[in-house]
Amino acid sequence: MLLVHFLREELGLTGTKIGCDTSQCGACVVSMNGSTVKSCTCLAVQADGAEIATIEGLANGSELHPMQEAFWDNHGLQCGYCTAGMIMTAVEMLERNPHPSSDEVRAGLEGNLCRCTGYQNIVKSILAAAEKMDGHAHNDETGGHAHHDH
Amino acid sequence: MYAPEFEYHRAATVAEAIQLLSSNEDAKLIAGGHSLLPLLKLRLARPSVLVDIGRISELKGITISDGTVRIGALTTHWEISSSHDLEHACGIMAEAAGGIGDTQVRNRGTIGGNVVHADPASDWPTVLTALGAKFNIQGAGGSTRTVEPGDFFVGPLTTTLGEQEVLTSIEAPTLGHHQRAEYAKMAHPASGFAVVGAAVVVTVEGDVCTAARIAVGGLVPVPVRMTSVETALVGKALNQENIAEAASHASNDLQGEILGDFFASAEYRKAMAEVEIRHALFHATEVSHH
């Protein structure tokens, strides 16, 4: 069983999407032990004992993560299918590089496809989040994390 | 897409992994899974047993000492691309790793998995061939052997790694004060895989090239050393004219099978090999190619 199937079908965490199934589109990106993975290219058993963060775990209760808020404020989505993966990738991007240039944001999104072709506002959202977070990339990690041991 | 059914074992040590390979005829190793899982989903591989070596700590990490970089087979492309020590010791490795796939592929994909998968469009085989790397392999009964890339890569997705052997680490020489190394690739715009990749390692004293190792990949079943280009370069000043002249010998070294597909014909790739060699040499010697 793939990690993405475990998250969606066993845990009911359907925020994570399946797009291409071939590790290209990034709709299934989740964070595993602090670094992003395409959950369609990871066996659930490989994640045994790992800390998995999905889009459901980003908000702190009713308070959205600054990245979620930035996507909302800047209309960083059209149909929304790629959004969960985009946001998970963007959060890690700012952890590794808190003040990216527009080019660096675009390069950092190479593993995430938006078929509405809405990259302009996605890049704008991430840059806005970077400014708002001002280097404080590590959000308080609470709620919504799937932690499973077998 | 779903992978076919398989039995799953997680090995705690290399010896245990080899034991599991020995006792299961149709077993395959899995590390990051970024070559194997896509094959499983497409039913291009159907092993009945998977042996997960992904948590064997002895296979992880980068150590640099006595002029040698040693990278554990399970080290991810991300770990390699973000290593400052490696950037100083052998920058071409950090640079090449950063150009593989995308962030998530680099986070999970391992150098060892990449090398044993032996995809002709991969970057590592070309870079490691130019560097004169060595592959350390462990086999049954604790036996070990060391193989050079030229004796390891046999053809597309085919190597001399035995069915009961594990690639444990990769060693490459650190680059000396007078050495420059660079990897230039024409990347497939969708996948990032190399349509053509060229890796150069040159020694420059004054402005004269005193030694050169050049390899190309992407367009050939296994990486090919560009010995004619190397010979044409050694003893010459590394200026724009001499680099272009030396690179023009590339076709001499590309007499074997050239790969071509819908995206890029064999003829086109062959022409681009010369261009990428030139780019790599220009970058390595910081000669502007504009």
Image: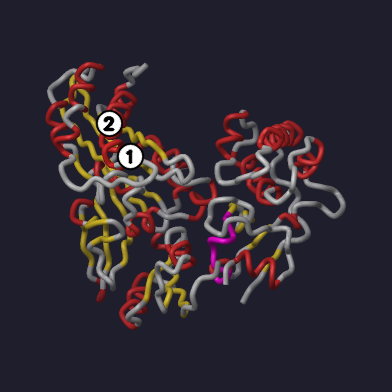
Three-letter amino acid code of the residue under disc 1:
Val
Residue located at (61% from left, 28% from top): A101
Residue located at (53% from left, 55% from top): A23
**Left or right side of B211 for A52:** right
**Helix, strand or loop for disc 1:** strand
Whether residue B66 appears in this view of the structure is no
Q: Which chain carries label 2?
A: B
The x and y percentages for residue B230 are: 16, 32
The x and y percentages for residue B194 are: 37, 43
Q: Mark 1 lies on which chain?
A: B
Label count reads 2
Residue position for label 1: B196
Residues in magenta, as a range: A37-45
Q: Does the magenta stretch include residue A83?
A: no
In the rendered view, tell whether residue B84 sits above or below residue B51: above
The x and y percentages for residue B223 are: 25, 46
Three-letter amino acid code of the residue under disc 2:
Ile
Residue position for label 2: B277
Q: Which mark is on residue A14?
A: none
Nearest the camera: B171 or B21?
B21
Where residue B271 sits, quadrant-wise, is top left
